[in-house]
Image (cartoon, rainbow, N blue to C red):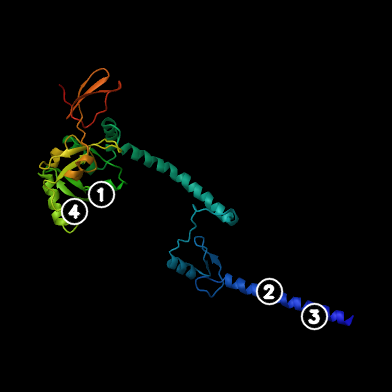
Amino acid sequence: MTNKAATLYMTTKTMSEKNDNTESENNKSSSVRLRCMECKEKISLYQCPGCQIRTCSLQCCQAHKKRTGCTGKRNRSEYLPLCRMNDNTLQSDYFFIEEVLEIMPRASKISKLAEENSISTSTSTSSINNNRSTASLNKKARRLVNQAKNRGITLQVMPSFLERHKNNTSWYCGPKDNITWKVEIIIMPTKNFFSFQLSEKEENILDCISKHIGEFHRDDSDMPTTLLGSYQLFTKRLPSSAKDPKYVQIENNICLKKALNGLTIIEHPTIYCVPNENLKDFPIGTEKITEKTDNIITTCTEQGSIEIPTTTEPPAESNHNICLD
């Protein structure tokens, strides 16, 4: 009986020692796991919602943000498993939905404004949109639109928050009665582009472009060394289909005032410099309406007269020249 009691006592003592060792190891690993991940000295008290790093104080929290660039905010649009969700994440998602519902009416207003100032499928609707939005333009833009209209140019102004409107430096000088346009030049086929100021009365557009390339882009290997005789100037005819655009050829020796007469431009002119071997990629809209019968429109082109069936609706106004036989 004495031997059995001694054996039982030794067994109990051994199990107790094992439990103590296991508990001390758990406590040790727990203290290591909960230690501050920034200073690695103190026990952590906080956990960053953005990157899950544990810190012990405000100084360590600020140090970890500076070191990692963390914002300290959870990405509310990121997927979060259900097992990691708690009351705080549920409340954050609720506030996120409230913010979205609050922003939606403002986004709708901006969308309507952009739609009113966008390019319409015909110049008739474009003129209606322009008249509607002219009242909201600033004084400089309104004056430029009116002066362009006096010169036979339909100038469409984009919403003020778009980059093309912000970067437009075109302006009208009243005493000289002159518009200085910002002209965007695109060199084909490399599609390298640059822009500069050009007076509407400056003769010979091609010489002005060549002079600008020689002064500011002489070291650029992608820029042509000479344009005269080997390049032609084009601008896009608006409104135009995005899949099948049409272009208007600009004579090299005329001024912008004559070149833009009867055309529609958005903010400022864009001119394409096309080498002679790539002219086939820039179809010119040469169709001219000559006569209309009940359901037939007769058009004359360089190849001759062609009869095209049409609907009973009148054709939309366009930049095509009208010639009556």
Dot label at residue 253: none
Q: Secondary structure at mark 4?
A: loop
What type is the residue that disc 3 sits on? Met
Q: CA distance from mark 4 to mark 3?
A: 94 Å
Q: Nearer the viewer, mark 3 or mark 1?
A: 3
**Contact? badges 3 and 1 (CB < 8 Å):** no
Q: CA distance from mark 1 to mark 2?
A: 71 Å
| Within-10-Å neighbours for mark 4: few <14, some 14–19, many 20+ | some
Q: Nearer the viewer, mark 1 or mark 2?
A: 2
What type is the residue that disc 2 sits on? Thr
What type is the residue that disc 1 sits on? Asn
Find disc 2 in the rendering and name its residue. 22
Q: Nearer the viewer, mark 4 or mark 3?
A: 4
Where is residue 38 shown, x and y percent of the image? 50, 71
| Within-10-Å neighbours for mark 3: few <14, some 14–19, many 20+ | few
What type is the residue that disc 4 sits on? Met
Spot the residue most to the top.
294
Dot label at residue 167: 1
Q: Nearer the viewer, mark 4 or mark 1?
A: 4
Q: Quadrant of residue 154?
A: top left
Sequence order check: which comes first, mark 2 or mark 3?
3
**Going 49% across and 70% down the picture, which residue do you hit?**
60
| Within-10-Å neighbours for mark 1: few <14, some 14–19, many 20+ | few
Q: CA distance from mark 2 to mark 3?
A: 19 Å
Indicate the quadrant containing the N terminus: top left, top right, bottom left or bottom right. Answer: bottom right
| Residue 171 in view here | no
**Contact? badges 1 and 2 (CB < 8 Å):** no
Find disc 3 in the rendering and name its residue. 10
**Number of numbered discs visible in the structure rendering:** 4
Q: Nearer the viewer, mark 4 or mark 2?
A: 4
Q: CA distance from mark 4 to mark 1?
A: 23 Å
